[in-house]
Image (spheres, rainbow, N blue to C red):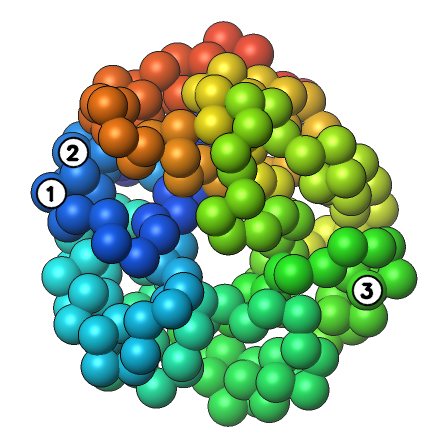
Amino acid sequence: MNPQTPPDRCRLVLIVMPGTDAGRLAEALEGGDVASVLLPQGPLDDAAFQRAAEKLVPLAQAAGAAAIIAGDSRVAGRVKADGIHIEGKRQELADTIERAQERMMVGTGGVKTRDEALELGEEGPDYMFFGRFGYDSEPAPHPRNLTLGAWWAEMVEIPCIVMGGSDIASVTTVAATGAEFVALSAAVFADGTDPRAAVARANALLDETAPRFGD
């Protein structure tokens, strides 16, 4: 369960890939502070994605985490999500911000260069995500994501999320960039992993090593 006062350091974002059991998300949320839960649509059609989101969104919100839909904005509205994530499409991002930002957060990602990030950043999203859904198969974060995250955190006021690796310890590497959030997926939800223990360990590492934003 999230504390009433969030920690003043890099926080966790959980990326729940399609097919993840709702019970495993519930266990993860019991492990400690989670800022938000991001739900990619992946290969699911809108109807299947909505059915999954109807189970997962309330779990996140009950634990005090923002539930963000990466996919159809209509699904986000139907399940009363807290946010919508738009991948790498400037016009779609601009249209979604104009239409929805007063009632839910709108974030973006899917960039590989500084120029691409700045172009999307000009639209005023609520956050920038550096990474790719489902590509956290290596223990360490991708070097490009770390480099972009460190640059963005230093130069731009919009918060950023940087994708961690499949090893829980990767949260320390991401936090060292100055990023506001570290995203974990396989490190928490992979087969054989205890989601509750994984989130607890991630928070303990961040408590021990992450820079404090107020310093």
Q: Quadrant of the N terminus?
A: top left
**Where's residue 61, x and y in %?**
22, 55
Kind of residue at badge 2: Glu
Left or right of residue 104: residue 116: right
The alpha-carbon separation of the residues under discs 3 and 1 comes to: 37 Å
Judging by the rendered image, the residue that carries numbered circle 2 is 27
Q: Determine whether label 2 and label 1 are within 8 Å by CB.
A: yes
Image point 41% across, 65% down: which residue? 42
Seen in the picture, residue 16 relative to 88 is either above or below; the reply is above
Residue of label 3: 116
Position of residue 175 relative to residue 34, above or below, is: above
Q: CA distance from mark 2 to mark 3?
A: 36 Å
User: Could you tell me how far apart the alpha carbons at marks 2 and 1 are, in whole angstroms?
Assistant: 6 Å
Image position, residue 191 (x, y; %): 26, 30
Can residue 6 be seen?
no
Q: For residue 177, which quarter of the picture?
A: top right
Instruction: Name the image quarter holding the C terminus.
Output: top right
